[in-house]
Amino acid sequence: MGPFLLITNFLTGLWCLNHFFYVRCADSKDIMQNITRRRGENCTLQTGIDSRSNIMILWSFTTSDKELPFAIAQLYKDDAEIIPTELFGNRLHLDIQTGSLTIKDITFRDSGVYQLLKRQKQDSHEKFYLLVYGEVGIPKVTVVQHYHSRRKLNTSCSVECTVENGREVTLSWYRGNDLLNLTSSPDLNMTLRVPLEVEHHDNSIYSCVSANPVSNQTTLLNITATCSDLPPDSVRSKRSHSFLIGLLPILILISFCAVLAFCFKRKLKAERAGLDVGVAIENLEGPGTDFFTWY
C-alpha cells in the first residue's frame, strides 16, 4: 500500500495547488500582456527572474480568460515537471534556472491565456495572452474589364486584387504611400476582394498589400502588362466585333460592284445576242426577195 498511498498524496497535493491557483487567479486583477506569434515559431514566456532560489513557479493555461485554467508546468527548487496534456504533447520546455516556459512549434490551438503564479513571501500573478497567426497569402491581381474611348487617346481598365482570408487579415490598394481602399471580413471562409480602376497612361505606382499582425505580402500592379498586353477574352471579342462592323461597309460596296458588273455583262451579252439574230434575219430575207422578184 506504500506506493499507492504515495501516488494518492501526490495527486491530492497537486489538486490542492491547482485549486489554490484557480482561486487566486480568478480573484486577482492582473495586467494582461499581449503576445503575437506566427504559426510554427517558438514562444518563450518570461518570469522576470534571473536566478531562482526557493520560489515556487506554477504555469497554467486556458483558451479564455473567463474559463478556469489547468496546470501545465511547475517548478520548485530543482524539481521541474511538465504536466502531460493532449494539447501540448512534448512541445513544452521549462527553464530550471528562471522558470520561463517555452512553447515549441506553436499552433492556432495554442492561442489563449497563460497564467503564471510565483509563490514566495508575497505571491505574484501574471497573465500572458498569446494569439497565433498564420502566414498571410500573396495577393493576386486580375483584370475585370477594359474600357476604350475613341474620343480619348487613353484606355482604362478595372482590376481586382484577391487573397484568401484569415485571422485579422486586411487587403489594401496603395498609390505610392497613399491608401486608396481597404477591406476585411470576420468570415474566414471567404476570399477578400478589393477593386481598382486605372488609366493605361497612369505612371503612378500601385500596390496591393495583404497583411495581418505578424506578416504582410505585396503585389505591384504593372499597368502596361496588365491592361494592354494581356486583355481578357471579352475585350478580344469586343475588338473582333468592332473590326467586323468596320469591315461591313466595305463588304457591301464590293457586293454592289459585283452585282453591277454582273448586270452590265448580262446586258451586253443580251445586246450581242439581239444583234446576231438581226443579221441572221437579214441574210434569210435577202435571197427570198430576189427570187420573188425574178419570178
Image (cartoon, helix red, strand yellow):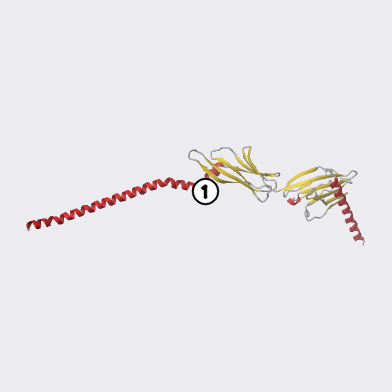
Left or right relative to 249: residue 133: right
Q: Residue at x 43, y 45 (%)?
A: 246
- Above or below 175: residue 84: below
In the rendering, at what x and y percent does residue 15 appear?
87, 54
- Tag 1: amino acid: Ser
Residue nearest the observer in this picture, 4 or 80: 4
Residue nearest the observer in this picture, 276 or 205: 276
Left or right relative to 272: residue 125: right
Left or right relative to 18: residue 179: left
In the rendering, at what x and y percent does residue 33 appear?
79, 43
Residue that extends furthest to the bottom in the rendered view of this protein: 1
Camera sees residue 162: yes
Corner quadrant of residue 203:
top right
Task: Give the SS element for disc 1.
Answer: helix
Left or right relative to 69: residue 283: left
Which residue in the structure is indicated by mark 1?
234
Camera sees residue 107: no
In the rendering, at what x and y percent does residue 183 appear?
65, 44
Q: Residue at x 55, y 44 (%)?
A: 226
Q: Residue at x 89, y 55 (%)?
A: 12
Corner quadrant of residue 47:
top right
In the rendering, at what x and y percent does residue 206 appear?
60, 40
